[in-house]
Image (cartoon, helix red, strand yellow):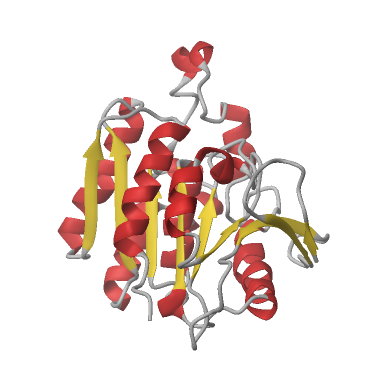
Amino acid sequence: MLIPIEEDLPGFDFEHDAPSLGRPKVAYVVAPSGAPPARGFPVCYMLHAFAGDRLSWARHGREFLAEHRERVLFVFPESGRRWFMNDASGKRYEDYLVEDLIPAVEASFPVERAARSRIIGGFSMGGAGAVHVALRHPGMFSRAFAISGAFYASERQGDPYASQRASGCMMPTEAEHDRVWGPVGSEIRRLYDTGALLEKAAAIGSPPTLALEVGTDDYPRVVEQNRRVHRKMNELGLPHAYAEHPGDHGWGFAASSARRLLARLLPATD
């Protein structure tokens, strides 16, 4: 079901069944206005940051949407303060993405049902989540990108951002983090360990095209997490693009980064 929204934004809400979550769910969709190419439009699934929602990207990313919306169908899911993963509390947001949302989109819109036309990316929590989902489901996505990705969250202990909370820190508290990831040493932390997922992808071969960007003024921990992923991919021989640009851990940087990455990653038009 397509539902208009009240905000002055270019898309609409898409209500669909979500058996993995046990209830109907709504994603935000921005669709091209013209006729689809013969094989259908490509689709870009974009995941929000911690405490964001399905409208976060549309509110902050008007420029990249205006530039690219006629080439690709954009889908913006919502998980609030949950990561896009099957978490320690039993919330199955990874299953929702893969088993519920993607089939619903492909049954409802004129899109190509093939990996070459599926892209997934995101900001912060959503960036790491996008790369993790792409690596955990070989052959589902042809491209994945992370902007200021919150990688190696499986290793987090305590609250490394405690001293920065007075300035509007976007990172989860210790309780919010452990609710999703479980205690140190949990099975969930093992399953979603960034390094282990990269190693598995290298062993299997033919991983998706990967691209990472991070702002040089981001939290030092986040910058190092992204550099660590970059080093790990180099060590494993995984092809990828990596860049650092001036910017902090905010939606302004995320939107400008998305514009750069989409210009590089979106498939050529027919």
Q: Residue furthest front?
A: 34
Query: Closest to the observer: 218 or 32?
Result: 32
Looking at the figure, which quarter contains the C terminus?
Answer: bottom left
> Image point 73% across, 65% down: which residue?
20
What x and y, as percent, mark residue 87? 62, 51
Relative placement, left or right, of 270 versus 54 is: left
- Evaluate whether residue 214 shows in this view: yes
Tell how many labels.
Answer: 0
Q: Looking at the image, is 129 positioned above or below residue 20?
A: above
> Image point 65% across, 55% down: which residue?
11
Relative placement, left or right, of 147 versus 80 is: left
Query: Closest to the observer: 105 or 69?
Result: 69
Q: Quadrant of residue 95?
A: bottom right
Q: Quadrant of residue 109?
A: bottom right
Q: Looking at the image, is 206 positioned above or below residue 229?
A: below
What x and y, as percent, mark residue 85? 58, 55
Q: Looking at the image, is 212 positioned above or below residue 167?
A: below
